[in-house]
Amino acid sequence: MESVTSIIDARELKKRFGSLEAVAGVSFEVRPGECFGILGPNGAGKTSTIRMIYGLSPVSSGTLRVFGRDIGTDYRSIKARIGICPQENNLDPDLTVLQNLEVYARYFSLPPTLARERALNLLQFMSLETRREAKVMELSGGMMRRLIIARALLNEPDLLILDEPTSGLDPQSRHQVWERLNELRAKGMTMLLTTHYMDEAARLCDRLMIMDQGKILVEGKPVDLIHEYVGRHVIEVSEPEEELRKHVRAAGLSYEDLGHLLIIYGNHHDQLYHEISSRYCREGCLMRMATLEDVFLKLTGRGLRE
Amino acid sequence: MMRISWRFLHVWQRNFLVYRRTWLVSFIPPLLEPLFYLLAFGIGMSLLVGYLRYEGTEISYTLFIAPALIAINIMSNAFYENTYASFVRMYYQKTFDAMMATPLTVEEIITGEMIWGATKAVLATAVMMVVISCFGLIRYPDGLLLLWVAFLGGLAFGSMGMIFTAFVPNIELFNLPIFLFITPMFLFGGTFFPLENLPVWAQQFALVLPLTHLVNLCRSCSYGVYGNLFWGSFLYLIVLTLVCFPLAIRGMYRRLIK
């Protein structure tokens, strides 16, 4: 029974909109208790993939099993076990904070007393208990996000889907959201996360995949991906001289040339950095730890996606 | 395939909760509208019109238009609710998106919306009946049937409204059905003058309009007269609802599920 041991099991999953293939055959698996990330530039197919998982968008081809069941036929029991934190704010502006939770709990057919009990607990968990009678529109962006996450937890889901959970938040609010998500993760909550923030992905995800144009480019643990695709260190040299370029090419280093900036990837670069900074550094150069962002840009390119 | 369970009531309850917060505001139009119309048309026009014949009986002009006011009220309450109000919830507030992330199906969400539209028509009718009854223009207990008529008419006009909601790209375009569909019915649906006053072709055209039949039902129940007119119109509205209700769900499904 291999399929039941995974929370999500997607095989050759495709989504077509007319002639556009938004998801072009992806296979991945999300295991119980892990946080799995889907990264990718705009239009990579992240949201289309997620929408198929919670049954908002019929699968064009391939198989998709959630909790070992088929989303096409078992949508009701599957959706009862998923919590969704959507990209767009869709809190109910006609209702108060507490009513938002109580009414949403009713959509899951929770009895009113249980709904209220869970709502009050979640408001406390998300530090919103003093705002329970406030209108949604009176809340700050960070508070709305926390309320959306609280709402997604009302049905005590076995899978929490977070579609860009911290987009547009200030640093304080982001950290607060991360803290709560880490607490949930520690309690064993399975999470599926999409994000544009690489630091967020590196911080939260156990495993992740990077998508582009509907396909999976790579998949793995964040640290492994960094080591495999860029190495441990990155050296950036502004306004590089032609001689440095020659040197880098001759040494067979992995690099990227942006014209005004030369980026050199690799391991154990202390010696190299010393050499470069003393011999080729005109405008400025630095060495830093490689990040997921380096992997992302290396794989998906630097062209704008609009 | 229609996936509808009793869960649609949760959607209805959500709308009812919001309505209860503003019920006073919602009660003002059905309270004042009949007063204005009865004063302006009933008293003002009565001097010109006096009495007219309806189904072989001579009745006063105020008695003639009172049930039509109820019918118009049913039409506009349900139609506005499932056009402008539903569109705002769907498009601007993303309320349906939030609901779709729960075990609710699109079919249940839209059913809940249309049953709510009909309920709103019933509530407005109840308020209006109180005012009109003060003028002694409704015969009881037959008049109580008006509440059921309001539900049926509300469902018919609500589902027609929802069909437009499934297709309009933006909210301004609702002006079109209001101007081309609602306003002509308001004037030519046998509301303010008997259809017999019109040329034959216009009479036949009026028989196509849903409001004409809702007006017939309202008159029957207000006067306690149930002739062929009543049963014919009853059948018309039932069939209309049976056609439009699933069409509205189908249309909204196509709009929401991609």
Image (cartoon, grey):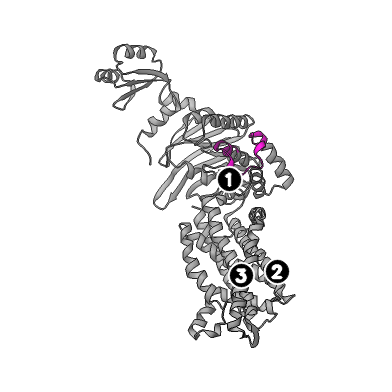
Q: Position of residue B85 (x, y in %)?
A: 56, 57
Q: Which residue is mark 3?
A: B36
What is the distance, in whole Å, between disc 2 and disc 3 at their CAs? 15 Å
Badge 2 marks a residue whose secondary structure is helix
Q: Earlier in the sequence, mark 2 or mark 3?
A: 3
The answer to whether B223 is drawn above or below residue A221 in the figure is: below
Q: Nearer the viewer, residue B230 or A136?
A: A136
Chain letter for mark 3:
B
Q: Nearer the viewer, mark 2 or mark 1?
A: 2
Apparent side of residue A253 relative to residue B20 in the rendered image (left or right): left
Q: How many marks?
A: 3
Apparent side of residue A21 relative to residue B124 in the rendered image (left or right): left
Q: Which residue is mark 1?
A: A91
Q: Position of residue B40 (x, y in %)?
A: 59, 74
Mark 1 closeness class: few <14, some 14–19, many ≥20 residues within 10 Å: many
Main secondary-structure element of the magenta-colored stretch: helix
Apparent side of residue A85 relative to residue B63 in the rendered image (left or right): left
What is the distance, in whole Å, between disc 3 and disc 1 at their CAs? 39 Å
Task: Confirm whether residue A6 shows in the render.
Answer: no
Q: At x 44% / y 25%, what residue is drawn? A: A291
Chain letter for mark 2:
B
- Amino acid carrying label 3: it is Phe
The answer to whether B247 is drawn above or below residue A39 in the figure is: below
Viewport quadrant of the N terminus of chain B: bottom right
